[in-house]
């Protein structure tokens, strides 16, 4: 790290908690992971873009996608991002463990709403003959969108682990850094979702 | 509510450095950042969904509009939720993000370019 240290991007807790050991290193490392993940998503988006017309006589986007369900998923994920922001605020301003956990539970619930509607969409697509083995288009779709869903699932598991740690150990440095990293992950996933609903769903239905 | 024992027990941690804790100016400013982010994100989401739902334009202008709304919304999320404010950041972080953007332009952009070119030669 170079000598001229300004704040890391993200919601630093340094000002409200004196010095958290390892905060700079840990948060920088997590940004490196996020950016590598962004490259993976970017390349899978590129693959999808090259495959979108390759329906091989199978159903295309207009037949398979349901704009209402996608709107609900988008709203649920956006509100969950906001709820996570409220958890970060509660942590930064020491509003107490209960408030942090309550905000995280709301986030988790909205994450489950998102995943529920997403799985329902996938099942509907299967029923309409749009399974991954139908065409290059469906293969690319099921390579991209469920990968994001998998990320949300892993983020949800991580959130449950953090809540359990908070209940068991209180809010110590490790838990705080965990909440800060999951915040970056969760907000990052919402940005990936912007790309998915714009490029895949709205672009496909336009 | 500000029981420092809950935060690991260091006596200094009992005193928030942000004046007024969850009622001070700093708190209100941070809350407003999130609220603005939410309001802008909702608007920037609802408009493209409505445009597509009612097929308000031709397909090609819809694609351009969707792309612009998505880019603006991504910037809003970066600023209001991820708290990334470009000129004031750590140099390492900004180099990391710029490097990622260059890799993405070369690899993702290059993939689409080359395969679109091949596609147009095949038909």
Image (tube, rainbow, N blue to C red):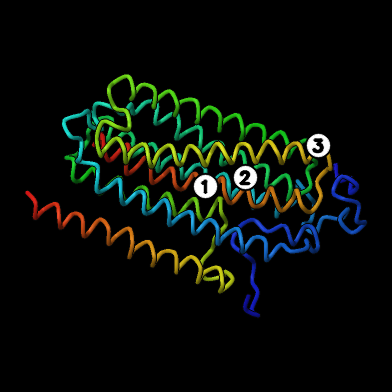
Q: Position of residue B123 (x, y in %)?
A: 6, 48
Ranked by sequence position, the earlier of labels 2 and 3 is 2
B22 in relation to A15, above or below: above
**Mark carried by residue A167:** 3
* SS class, disc 2: helix
Q: Residue furthest bottom?
A: A3
Q: Chain of mark 2?
A: A
Quadrant of res A202: top left
Q: Measure the alpha-carbon separation of dots 2 and 3.
A: 20 Å
Q: Position of residue A127 (x, y in %)?
A: 32, 19
Does residue A205 appear left or right of residue A93 in this picture? left
Q: Position of residue A47 (x, y in %)?
A: 30, 49
Closest to the observer, B66 or A31:
A31
* SS class, disc 1: helix
Residue at horizontal 33 percent and vertical 25 percent from the top: A125
Residue at horizontal 22 percent and vertical 59 percent from the top: B113
**Mark carried by residue A142:** none
Crowding around mark 2 (Cα neighbors within 10 Å: few <14, some 14 to 19, many 20+) is: many
Does residue B81 appear left or right of residue B7 in this picture? left
Q: Which residue is mark 1?
A: B37
Q: Measure the alpha-carbon separation of dots 3 and 1.
A: 30 Å
Q: Which residue is mark 2?
A: A85
B45 in relation to A32, above or below: above
Badge 1 vs badge 2, beta-carbon distance below 8 Å: yes
Q: Are marks 2 and 3 on the same chain?
A: yes
Does residue A81 appear left or right of residue B10 in this picture? left
């Amino acid at each position: 790290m170079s000598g001229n240290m300004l704040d890391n991007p993200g919601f630093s807790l340094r000002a409200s908690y004196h010095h958290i050991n390892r905060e700079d290193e840990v948060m920088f490392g997590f940004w490196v992971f996020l950016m590598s993940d962004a490259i993976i998503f970017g390349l899978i988006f590129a693959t999808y873009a090259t495959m979108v017309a390759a329906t091989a006589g199978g159903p295309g986007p207009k037949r398979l996608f349901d704009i209402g369900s996608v709107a609900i998923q988008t709203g649920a994920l956006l509100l969950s991002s906001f709820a996570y922001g409220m958890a970060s605020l509660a942590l930064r301003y020491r509003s107490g463990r209960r408030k942090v956990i309550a905000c995280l539970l709301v986030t988790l619930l909205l994450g489950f709403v998102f995943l529920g509607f997403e799985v329902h969409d996938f099942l509907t697509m299967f029923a309409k003959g749009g399974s991954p083995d139908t065409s290059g288009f469906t293969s690319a779709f099921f390579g991209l969108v469920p990968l994001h869903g998998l990320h949300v699932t892993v983020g949800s598991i991580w959130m449950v682990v953090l809540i359990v740690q908070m209940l068991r150990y209180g809010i110590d440095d490790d838990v705080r850094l965990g909440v800060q990293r999951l915040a970056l992950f969760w907000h990052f996933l919402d940005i990936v979702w912007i790309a998915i609903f714009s490029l895949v769903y709205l672009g496909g239905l336009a | 509510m500000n029981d420092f024992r809950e935060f690991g027990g260091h006596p200094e941690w009992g005193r928030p450095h942000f004046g007024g804790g969850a009622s001070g100016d700093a708190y209100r400013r941070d809350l407003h950042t999130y609220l603005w982010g939410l309001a802008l994100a909702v608007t920037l989401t609802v408009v493209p969904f409505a445009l597509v739902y009612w097929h308000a334009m031709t397909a090609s202008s819809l694609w351009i509009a969707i792309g612009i709304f998505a880019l603006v919304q991504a910037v809003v999320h970066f600023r209001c939720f991820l708290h990334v404010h470009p000129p004031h950041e750590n140099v390492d972080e900004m180099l990391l993000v710029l490097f990622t953007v260059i890799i993405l332009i070369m690899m993702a952009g290059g993939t689409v370019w080359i395969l679109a070119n091949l596609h147009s030669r095949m038909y």
